[in-house]
Image (cartoon, rainbow, N blue to C red):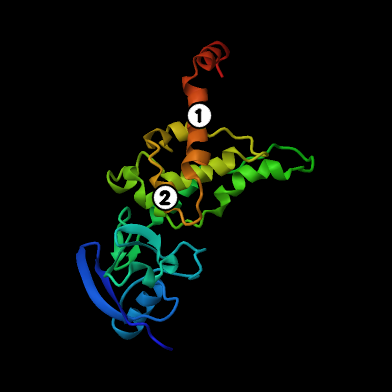
Amino acid sequence: MQTMGEAVLSVFRGDAAGGKEETFRVPIVPGMVVLDAIHWIQAHLADDLAVRWNCKAGKCGSCSAEINGRPRLMCKSRVDAYGGSTIHVRPIKAFPVIKDRVTDVSWNYEVAKRIPPFKPADTNVPWTIHNEDMERIQEFRKCIECFLCQNVCHVLRDHSEKAVYNGPRFMIKIAALEMHPKDTLRRTGYLKGPGGIGYCNITKCCEEVCPEHIHITDNGIIPLKERVADDYFDPVRFVLRKVTGK
């Protein structure tokens, strides 16, 4: 295959104890993405380079990385887009490094287990669901769990407050449940408490890095904040709760 010059990649090598970037020169071929370059390094220069990947089609979310400081999917980042400058490839910062480009994202799966699941009405009546009822939540279901939104969330990335906030990925998961036309469970108590939705200050950095272009803040987090405000801070509802005990 005809090459188009060389790309210079500076790739983080190391583990939880520390590490540093190592420089590799990779022959560029037409259409090459950063993940291709990493695979070339594995095959020819460093067969012990650790990298997580699966589909190479931007749908599995496995190959998240920080490329020149910006969280991106390696399989959707073309080498020629960097104009011949050195491409720095590092693991996402919000989660502990296991080795090289692989991070421990298991915390996210533990959070998913704690979220109250879908709860439809207890009835034997067949469901009738109209397209317009489902359109609102279809966007949320495009999430590929790349955790780039989690990585740029300042609560998780800069302050490491995983004990108090679930992060934008799980705000979207809860929004998909809360807005489902057949769900009957109210999760505002979880959002106000363990979910920690109050820690989100609507910077929209999560939206900027989402490869599926989900409107995480506008269509998910803000409506959820409004529901929490209605249930816990609306003075009329506060009086009604005091009177009725509900």
Rendering quarter of residue 75 = bottom left
Residue 58 horizontal/vertical position (percent) = 49, 65
The answer for how far apart the CA atoms under marks 1 and 2 are is: 22 Å
Quarter of the image for the C terminus: give it: top right
Residue located at (50% from left, 15% from top):
238
Q: Could you tell which of marks 1 and 2 lies nearer the N-terminus?
A: 2
Residue 124 horizontal/vertical position (percent) = 78, 40
Q: Which mark is residue 226?
A: 1
Rendering quarter of residue 29 = bottom left
Looking at this rendering, what residue extends furthest in the bottom direction?
1
Rendering quarter of residue 104 = bottom left
Quarter of the image for the N terminus: give it: bottom left
Tell me the amino acid under the disc marked 1: Glu
Whether residue 47 is visible, yes or no, is no
Residue located at (29% from left, 62% from top):
68
Residue 169 horizontal/vertical position (percent) = 46, 48
Q: What kind of element bears circle 1?
A: helix
Q: Residue 234 vs residue 131: left or right?
A: left
Name the residue tied to disc 2: 208
Residue 33, compared with residue 214, is above or below; it is below
Q: Residue 56 vs residue 44: left or right?
A: right
**Nearest to the observer: residue 241 or residue 27:** 27
Q: What kind of element bears circle 2?
A: helix
Residue 89, compared with residue 199, is above or below; it is below
Residue 145 horizontal/vertical position (percent) = 47, 56
Whether residue 33 is visible, yes or no, is yes
Q: Residue 65 vs residue 8: left or right?
A: right
Tell me the amino acid under the disc marked 2: Glu
Residue located at (65% from left, 45% from top):
135
**Nearest to the observer: residue 34 or residue 20:** 34
Looking at this rendering, what residue extends furthest in the right direction?
125
